[in-house]
Amino acid sequence: MTEEGRRLEEARQAGVPWRKWGPYLAERQWGTVREDYSDSGNAWDYFSHDQARSRAYRWGEDGLGGISDDHQRLCFALALWNGVDPIVKERLFGLTNSEGNHGEDVKEYYFYLDSTPTHSYMKYLYKYPQSPYPYSNIVDTNRGRGRHQAEYELLDTGVFDGNRYFDVFVEYAKAAPEDILVVLTIVNRGPERASLHVLPTLWFRNTWSWGGEVTKLGLRRLEGPAGMSVVAASHAELGERYLYCDRSPALLFTENETNAERLFGAPNCSPWVKDAINESCPARHEGRRALSGHRGGGQERGDSAAPLARRRRGTSARALRRLRRGRRRAPARGRRVLRIHHAIERHTGRRSRDAPGARGDALEQAGFLLRRRALARRARRRSVRIAWRHGP
């Protein structure tokens, strides 16, 4: 019996939760009937792509190459910023039914390359241009074309000319049902060095803003082992878990709450809204003070965290690695070595301000999967490594 056959048998006969964590995060939650509360039933206009970065979802979440538990309570996905886009790339972009000359159509290049039945191994590829993503150009050009004309694709805009783009590979390998190793490999296909911000993100779906008696959840910063930044994730059903970030990246927290001021002109109860981290990258690039960019000035609670972070609490966590200057940028036609180690483990003791020590056994157990896929060799050749642990 193969190793995957053994896992399938354990899931069927013994109820081992090999499928508890998998690729359950939606590609697109905006513009769906699940989030539509309009009187006209026009889901596309009621919740648009432009609103998605600022508006909390109720019934699901979306992201790039992401995973979640089978009830989509705790989510993990990739976010990217090339230093020139007006927004952080957190989700796929596409045309609505009225914008496309042939109806709705995603305008991105991404590929699901591999997956086992238990999701013990998964591989995903996203192609990210190094020049600004042409949002308006794509919408305006397609809207102006007739039904009998060809669609205007992302490739037609010229953003991939000269191979000036990044290949972003995301690979997951499970050492156990809730021990997950994630490897990100960033490849610069262009002829020059290029800048890239890589922001792996952990967050809770907003289940507390819709009435009822659901307790609000949260992430918080802890003191961890030397050389690590640590986030604790608290959930009534999932328990206490920890996110370990190697090399002590900064952590920025915000709230997974709607930015009512931006969307509806209504005052926000707090400045820490869903798009706070999104806004921080362009703000820093343009020389403006980042939304949460000064030490000691942030609040102590929130729903989203990133390694630009200064706040100490939230319900979403991002681990930022920036390739911006000189040799730190991704080399032409090569891989840039970055190591980001995340390990999430279930808390089995009493609640504490200090995180338990990160163990390496999960990585060792997951190693056999990575070696079989030749990932160890790729890691030595300049990759981004993330190890993410769940479970005892």
Image (tube, grey):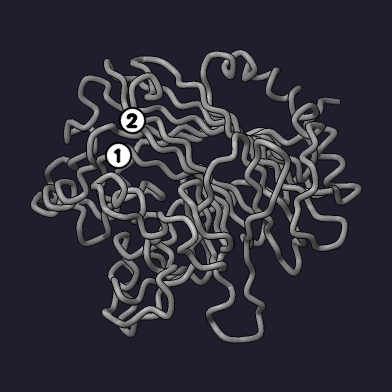
Residue in the image at 45% along x and 69% along y: 56
Task: Report whether 23 appears left or right of 346.
Answer: left
Q: Nearer the viewer, residue 32 or 343?
A: 343
Residue 325's x, y, as percent?
34, 27
Whether residue 391 is situated above or below residue 372 in the rendered picture: below
Question: Residue 116: in sight, yes or no?
Answer: no
Secondary structure, mark 2, is loop
Question: Residue 77: in sight, yes or no?
Answer: yes
Secondary structure, mark 1, is loop
Query: What amino acid type should be assigned to the residue bearing mark 1?
Result: Gly
Q: Nearer the viewer, residue 273 or 155?
A: 273
Reading the image, the residue beneath label 1 is: 83
Q: Quadrant of residue 111?
A: top left
Reading the image, the residue beneath label 2 is: 195
Looking at this rendering, what residue extends furthest in the front direction? 296
Q: Quadrant of residue 126?
A: top left
Query: What amino acid type should be assigned to the residue bearing mark 2?
Result: Ser
